[in-house]
Structure formats: structure tokens, C-alpha cells
Amino acid sequence: MNLYQMIFKRRSIRKFKREQVPEQLLKDILYFGNCVLKLHPDISVKMELYENLDGRLPVKGLWKVEAPYYLAFYSEEKSGYLANAGYILEPVLLYMTGKGLGTCYLGNAKIHEEGPEGYKQVITVAFGYPKTLLYRDPATAKRLPLKELCVFKEEVGEPIKNILKAARLAPSSMNTQPWRFIVYHDRIYIFACRDFLPSSPLVSMRELCIGIMLSHLTIAAEEMWMNIKLEVDEAMAKKSYKSGTYVTTAYIKEFNCG
């Protein structure tokens, strides 16, 4: 199964077997991660895998999950680095799901080991072979319906609807789904919802989740044989909106093979 199919199958796993993952698969995960396109190509990132089969790895955080392995994502602190992290990481987790591994984003958990110099540890992912069911039925996903996430300004075709269905299933902190869409037949205006109780950790997680959702948009567009370009409309960015913040615009058109 490909990444697009994994969008509909992946679920967060919080119980893992103390079972070793083959060394070659661990190498493949890092290699795949290094091949994923970035949302912001100018931001340097690194990924490190940590084994915890003996349970002694010092992982700290409110939402810590005990796992045999962890993936730590490190990034330069530049504008857009959080959304960039989510955009890169989500395809990696979908790839891992396709390889039979369970995964779980750990919001504020940190591995107390010194990371690469000049990089900030952005987020940690718990992973390993699951004790519970690896895949889900997408119908059981607790997500808002598209009619609550989207304002349709024009009639759209099935490819656009399928892209939005994939975006709808993107994981988010506390299942908040902090995104809304204004939809035309060839473009989608993307907004981030305002936090009711804004705080630095919540805003950071919102930005990372937006990046995850944008990766779903991109993966789905490619599956639908649509060309997608994410570009900030400067005029939109200068406006003030009552219930949200403008993020970017997804311009979508069919691939031209001629």
C-alpha cells in the first residue's frame, strides 16, 4: 500500500511489543526521511532513532508513551520550522505504518540526550510493533465532517473532494483539527483556527499539525494526478480575520502530460 492509502489506515498506537525492529528497516526509515521533500527547503533538519528495548531511555513529558523505539526530529529554528517538521514527519510515519510499525506523536516529550549542535528537538515519535490493531476503519476516525471544515465557493470535482477527505484525516493535538478551508474548483485557501487559550506550547503544536495536514494535501493531490503548489497570497496574509489566521493557498490543477 502507498502513502495515500496509509492516510486512511493509520491510527495512533500507544501500546507496543518489546520486539526488535530489523536493523535494515531502521536504516530504510532514515533514508526515506532524508528523501522527503520539505515545505521550506532552506531549513536544515535531522532525524535520529533511539532504541529503548530495555526501557532505560530517559524520555520525559506529560504525554510520554512507553515504546521500544523513538524517533527524535531536530530542526534549525527558522520561520516556519514547526510546520516544516510536521510536513516532513507525516510521510515518514505513513511509510512506517506501511511497514507494519505503529507510531504515536508525543506532543511535549523529549529525549534527554544531547542532540545535534545548532538544532532544536521539535518533537518525538514513539514507534514499534503494536500490541493492538495497526490499522483503522476510516469511518471510525473522530473527525469533523467536511461541511464543518470547508466553505465551498464553487462546485468541485471528485479529485478535490478526495484531497479534502485526506486533509480531514490528518492527526492533530487533542484532535482539535485546527484548520479550515475556503474551496474553489482550482484552489483551496487554508486557515488556522485561533486558540481559545493561546499559549506557546499550544501554538507550537498547532503549527506542527498544520504541517501534517499540508502533507496530506500534497500526498492526496499526487495520488489524484493533480499538480499542487502551496503559495502564500500576500494580499490575504495582510488581512485580519475574526476566527482564524490565513496560512497559505493550495493551487491545484491536473497534470499536463502533453
Image (tube, helix red, strand yellow):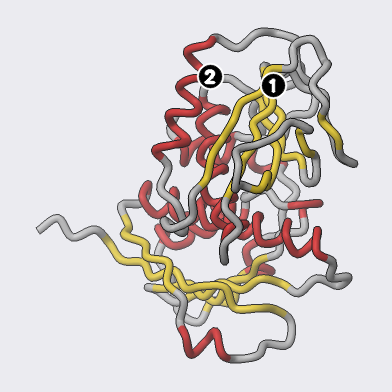
Tell which of 119 and 43 is nearer to you. Answer: 119
Identify which residue is drawn at 69% across, 21% down. Answer: 69
Residue at 40% across / 54% down in the picture? 221
In the rendered view, does 28 fall on the left or right side of 176?
left
At label 1, which amino acid type do we have?
A: Tyr
Q: Secondary structure at mark 2?
A: helix
Q: Residues within 10 Å of mark 1 (few under 14, many from 20)?
A: many
Classify 47 as above or below 85. Answer: above
- From the top left corner, tell me how far across and down residue 56 is, in percent: 83, 16
Using the image as rendered, state which of residue 201 and residue 77 is in the foreground.
77
Quadrant in which the N terminus appears: top left
Q: Between disc 2 and disc 1, whose residue precedes?
A: 2
Looking at the image, residue 57 sits to the left or right of residue 38; the answer is right
The tally of labels here is 2
Say left or right for 31 vs 258: right
Q: How would you rate the neighbour count of disc 2 (Cα within 10 Å): few for under 14, some for 14-19, many for 20 or more?
A: some
Residue, disc 1: 69
What residue is at 65 percent from the left and 36 percent from the top? 115
Circle 2 residue: 26
For the point 55% across and 27% down, the residue is 96
